[in-house]
């Protein structure tokens, strides 16, 4: 797939903050999508070796069958700085996505979207590079405050930071910890919530990011599923 290259990744931390500040205003908080292909992305990091693995898993919708899996392992150059994780992780994800034979209509990222102090977490940063509807679905909170959602699946509350609704705290499964859903790019919050729920299949995490986590950990084989391409002929 084609990726818009908006800036270099080999920058200082001060320049990285400047880039985030400049790009945050480009993030679109509105839109909807009717996807046929939904991608999930995740990253695993080996701190001992200083390497990371970026993974993208593309699923058909509504069946959520695996269409394609791509992974890239390489050294991580950028230091660990809270709030600047996209400069560590995005290059590996983008490299994996460049190998895709298909073009996803929607991306779900294991990370924050606008639920970020500068309103541009990993999902939003990647969304701008992809120029595609993108959702952040994180396992933990980076900023903001919220009430606890109800115990039942589909219950959610608003995540608020400095009087700005930056996301939703969503219970995807009854009795399990909620996830933190936020706008990545080119999608509204209500639509982002709906698509996360539409991609859940009995687990806490939606299938695209759950499988991307497996791929990043080496537990899901990379490659294309030829049956999908045969179906399109």
Image (cartoon, rainbow, N blue to C red):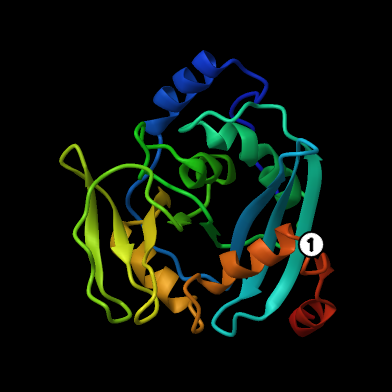
Specify whether 90 is left or right of 151.
right
Q: Which residue carries the number 1 mark?
A: 218
Q: Looking at this view, is 151 or 200 the one in front?
A: 151
Task: Using the image, determine if residue 166 lies above or below residue 64.
Answer: above
Q: Looking at this view, is 175 or 14 the one in front?
A: 175
SS assignment at label 1? loop
Task: Using the image, determine if residue 225 lies above or below residue 148.
Answer: below
Task: Using the image, determine if residue 52 lies above or below residue 84.
Answer: below
The residue sitting at the left extreme is 163
Q: Looking at this view, is 116 or 45 the one in front?
A: 45
Residue 152: horizontal and vertical position, in percent? 28, 81
Q: Quadrant of residue 156?
A: bottom left
Q: Quadrant of residue 95?
A: top right
Residue 175: horizontal and vertical position, in percent? 35, 80
Identified at 53% across, 55% down, the residue is 109
Q: Dot 1, how many residues are within 10 Å of its Cα: few (below 14), some (14-19), or many (20+)? A: some
Q: How many marks?
A: 1
The residue sitting at the front extreme is 48
Q: Quadrant of residue 176?
A: bottom left
Residue 220: horizontal and vertical position, in percent? 77, 69
Q: Is residue 112 visible?
A: yes
Identified at 40% across, 40% down, the residue is 27
Quadrant of the image for the C terminus? bottom right
Q: Is residue 101 visible?
A: no
């Amino acid at each position: 797939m084609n990726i818009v290259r908006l800036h270099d990744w080999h920058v200082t931390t001060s320049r990285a903050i400047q880039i985030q500040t400049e790009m945050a205003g480009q993030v679109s908080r509105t839109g909807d999508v009717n996807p046929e292909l939904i991608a999930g992305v995740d990253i695993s990091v080996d701190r001992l070796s200083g390497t990371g693995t970026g993974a993208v898993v593309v699923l058909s919708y509504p069946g959520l069958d695996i269409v394609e899996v791509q992974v890239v392992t390489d050294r991580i150059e950028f230091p660990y700085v809270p709030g600047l994780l996209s400069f560590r992780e995005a290059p590996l994800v983008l490299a994996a996505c460049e190998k895709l034979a298909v073009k996803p209509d929607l991306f779900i990222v294991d990370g924050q979207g606008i639920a970020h102090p500068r309103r541009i977490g990993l999902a939003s940063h990647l969304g701008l590079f992809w120029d595609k509807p993108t959702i952040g679905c994180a396992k933990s909170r980076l900023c903001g405050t919220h009430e606890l959602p109800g115990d039942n699946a589909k219950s959610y509350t608003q995540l608020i930071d400095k009087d700005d609704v930056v996301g939703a705290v969503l219970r995807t499964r009854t009795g399990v910890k909620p996830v933190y859903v936020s706008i990545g790019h080119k999608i509204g919050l209500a639509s982002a919530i709906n698509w996360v729920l539409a991609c859940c299949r009995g687990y806490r995490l939606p299938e695209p990011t759950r499988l991307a986590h497996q791929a990043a950990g080496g537990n899901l084989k990379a490659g294309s599923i030829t049956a999908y391409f045969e179906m399109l002929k």
